[in-house]
């Protein structure tokens, strides 16, 4: 579904990604794990073309998207939930969700909104509240709901567990699995490698801008090197 080939990204003199290649098949949850600063967020921003790559190629559903503007990429079905949620603080929950549908011109926006409220009943209870008054977990749900409003085929999730209590992390990961089960392919960036590998089908390990390991998520989770470096053993 998505193929990233030999992509490099520089921020001035900093080489954030070096010849990164990986692929995502339709229906999968693929996890990207790695330490702080390994380049995980940069990969998501490069797929969305918020950050330009130098060299390399990104193909989505057999179409090259490397140089497309971000809104065109959203229109094609790729939506990103940014690190730190970045909800529109002063807007209500409802308005934030409407913003997620801004690239759409069909007449099913209202019924999709209802589906979001069924998936996230907490957002339904807080429809009229400004987003800034929501708790961290609720803001994560809103950011995910907003992304889903664009009807993505591929959802890019950046650190959904960040700053959340363990019980909420469980809940968010449960919802990620449900979203995947209902047909959305997922690329999941996580510092919480344990949780990420527990729900992913496959995973890539990133170190200082390079893919150093890849494979079946369960196999990686039992790999002694991975356990020592990323799973706190
Ligand atoms: P984290 O989990 O801490 O967010 P990450 O794996 O997502 O880390 P990135 O945010 O992609 O890592 O950063 C990769 C490298 O690029 C880091 O060394 C970071 O300091 C650097 N970097 C990221 N954004 C910029 C920027 N806008 N300008 C300069 N350097 C940047």
Image: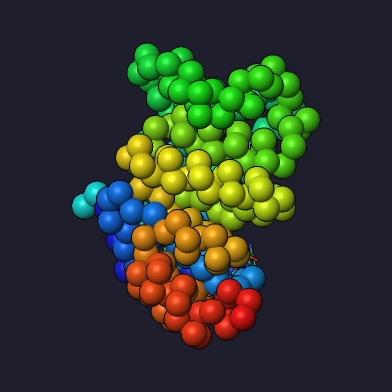
The image quadrant in which ligand 1 is located: bottom right
Q: How many marks?
A: 0
Q: Could you say where residue 95 lies in the image, as x and y percent from the top left?
A: 61, 21
User: Foreground: 158 or 191?
Assistant: 191
Q: Could you say where residue 121 lies in the image, as x and y percent from the top left?
A: 59, 25
Residue 148 vertical position relative to residue 109 in the rendered view, above or below: below
Residue 75 vertical position relative to residue 105 in the rendered view, above or below: below
User: Foreground: 195 or 27?
Assistant: 195
The residue at 74%/37% (across/down) is: 135
**Is residue 158 visible in this depiction of the protein?**
yes
User: Foreground: 46 or 119?
Assistant: 119
Q: Residue furthest left?
A: 62
Q: Could you say where residue 140 lies in the image, as x and y percent from the top left?
A: 63, 41
The residue at 39%/32% (across/down) is: 151
The residue at 62%/26% (across/down) is: 123
The residue at 59%/49% (across/down) is: 170
């Amino acid at each position: 579904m998505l193929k990233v080939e030999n992509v490099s990204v520089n921020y001035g003199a900093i080489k954030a990604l070096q010849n990164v290649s990986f692929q995502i098949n339709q229906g999968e949850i693929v996890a990207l794990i790695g330490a702080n600063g390994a380049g995980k967020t940069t990969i998501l921003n490069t797929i969305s073309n918020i950050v330009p790559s130098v060299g390399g190629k990104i193909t989505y559903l057999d179409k090259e998207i490397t140089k497309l503007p971000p809104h065109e990429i959203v229109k094609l079905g790729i939506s990103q939930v940014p690190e730190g949620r970045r909800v529109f603080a002063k807007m209500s929950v409802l308005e934030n969700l409407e913003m997620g549908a801004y690239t759409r011109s069909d007449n099913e926006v209202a019924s999709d909104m209802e589906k979001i409220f069924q998936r996230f009943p907490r957002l339904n209870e807080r429809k009229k509240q400004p987003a800034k008054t929501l708790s961290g977990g609720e803001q994560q749900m809103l950011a995910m709901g907003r992304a889903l409003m664009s009807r993505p085929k591929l959802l890019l999730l950046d650190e959904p567990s960040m700053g959340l209590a363990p019980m909420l992390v469980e809940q968010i990961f449960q919802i990620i699995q449900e979203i995947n089960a209902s047909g959305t392919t997922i690329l999941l960036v996580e510092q919480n490698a344990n949780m990420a590998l527990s729900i992913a089908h496959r995973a890539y390990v990133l170190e200082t801008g390079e893919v150093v390991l890849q494979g079946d998520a369960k196999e990686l989770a039992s790999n002694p090197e991975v356990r020592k470096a990323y799973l706190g053993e």
